Amino acid sequence: MENVVPSLPKGHGDAKIHMPKRWLFHYADPVVKHRERIADEVMDFIRAAGPDVELWANYGAYDHVCLAQLWGRMIDLPEGVPMFTNDIQQERARLGLSWDDLPKQESGEHNALADARHNQTVRRWLAEQEARTS
């Protein structure tokens, strides 16, 4: 809530006056997407990566649960959406590395796009470490 809601659209002018007080953001704003549309767009994004797509996250177990909930139960995941998410911390531990060994995120923590880019950097770095030891 603290990191996401401030980035969502707020009501302005008359729209703000008519918004229920309980609204945290302007739910009726055209840029706010309904769950079904988000699910379709996420599915299309994942499928576009190809049949061998892998999902990676930092401490991602619960992230995968939330992802699956876009479509209902885990068994309701659409074809082409992986049934699990690989975890950066598990890979770090498997390679015998410590938390302090990982590349540090310089800025943008708790910004979804900046965090995703950093996770990609860390995952590629871990792949390099594995290649060096193989």
Image: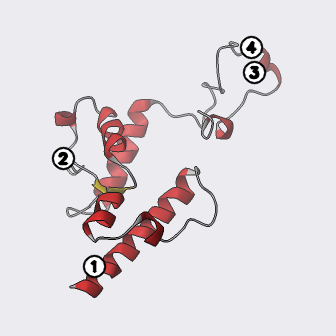
Q: Residues within 10 Å of mark 2 (few under 14, many from 20)?
A: few
Q: Amino acid at mark 4?
A: His
Callout 4: SS: helix
Residue 35 at x, y = what percent?
A: 42, 31
In primary-sequence order, the first of circles 1 and 2 is 2
Q: Which residue is mark 2?
A: 79
Categorize mark 4 by other alpha carbons within 10 Å: few (<14), some (14-19), many (20+): few
Upstream in sequence: badge 1 or badge 4:
4
How far, Cα to Cα, is label 1 from label 2?
A: 30 Å
- Verify CB contact (< 8 Å) between mark 1 and mark 4: no
Please tell me which residue lies in front, 102 or 51.
102
Q: Residue at x 25, y 66 (%)?
A: 94
**In terms of image quadrants, where is residue 129?**
bottom left
Q: What SS does tag 3 mark?
A: helix
Question: Where on the picture, by quarter, is residue 50?
Answer: bottom left
Amino acid residing under circle 1? Glu
Task: Name the residue beneath numbered marker 1.
Answer: 130
> How far across and how far down the image is residue 83, in percent?
20, 47
Q: Which structural element holds mark 1?
A: helix
Q: Which residue is mark 4?
A: 18
Disc 2/disc 4 C-alpha distance (Å): 42 Å
Q: Are marks 2 and 4 in contact (CB under 8 Å)?
A: no
Residue plotted at (64% across, 19% down): 23
Residue that label 3 marks: 15
Q: Left or right: 6 with respect to 45? A: right
SS label for mark 2: loop
